[in-house]
């Protein structure tokens, strides 16, 4: 764990993601909030991440059978490219 208060954007975004899943420590949240004071790009990332979390937790995400099959097929095709 880094004791630096000033963190780079990459770390701030990672902490933002961890916060979304309630996995960030208090110290990480403090460093993130300090970073957000001066970084407009990360504030936007955090705002969008928060919106996405609210949307996903508010309404269940459902797909019909053909959409699920299409998604599965596309995933398997992409996976095959990387193996």
Image: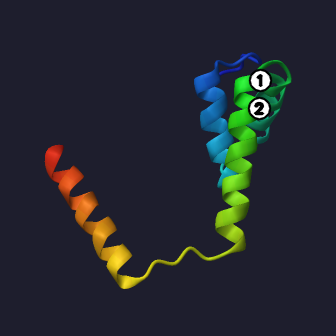
Mark linked to residue 40? 1
What kind of element bears circle 1? Answer: helix
Residue 81 drawn at (x, y percent): 15, 45
Residue depicted at 65% across the width and 50% down the height: 23
Q: Is residue 22 above or below residue 10?
A: below
| x and y percentages locating residue 32 in the rendered image | 76, 31
Q: Residue at x 64, y 18 (%)?
A: 8
Q: Nearer the viewer, residue 66 or 42?
A: 66
> Is 45 left or right of 81, judged from the image as shown?
right
The image shows residue 81, relative to residue 77, as above or below, that is above
Look at mark 2 in the image and give the residue it sits on.
43
Q: Is residue 59 visible?
A: yes
Q: Is residue 49 above or below residue 76?
A: above
The quarter of the displayed image where residue 18 is located: top right
Query: What SS does tag 2 mark?
Result: helix
Cβ atoms under marks 1 and 2 closer than 8 Å: yes
Per the model, the C-alpha gap separating discs 1 and 2 is 5 Å
Residue that protrudes farthest toward the bottom in the picture: 65
Residue 24 seen from this side: no
Q: Image quadrant for the N terminus?
A: top right
Q: Which mark is residue 6?
A: none
Few, some or many residues within 10 Å of mark 2 (<14, 14–19, 20+): some
At horizontal 56% and vertical 73% (from top left) the residue drawn is: 61
Quarter-of-image position of residue 38 = top right
Q: 62 above or below 29? A: below
70 left or right, relative to 26? left
Is 42 in front, or is 21?
A: 42
Residue at 23% of width from left, 51% of height from top? 78
* Horizontal arrangement in the rendering, residue 1 relative to residue 75 (left or right): right
- Residue 53 placement (x, y as % from top left): 68, 58
């Amino acid at each position: 764990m880094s004791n630096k208060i000033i963190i780079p954007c990459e770390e701030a975004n990672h902490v933002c993601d961890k916060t979304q899943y309630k996995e960030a420590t208090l110290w990480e949240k403090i460093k993130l909030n300090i970073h957000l004071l001066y970084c407009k790009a990360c504030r936007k990332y955090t705002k969008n991440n928060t919106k996405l979390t609210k949307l996903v937790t508010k309404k269940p995400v459902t797909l019909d059978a053909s959409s699920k099959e299409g998604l599965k097929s596309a995933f398997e095709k992409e996976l095959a490219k990387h193996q």
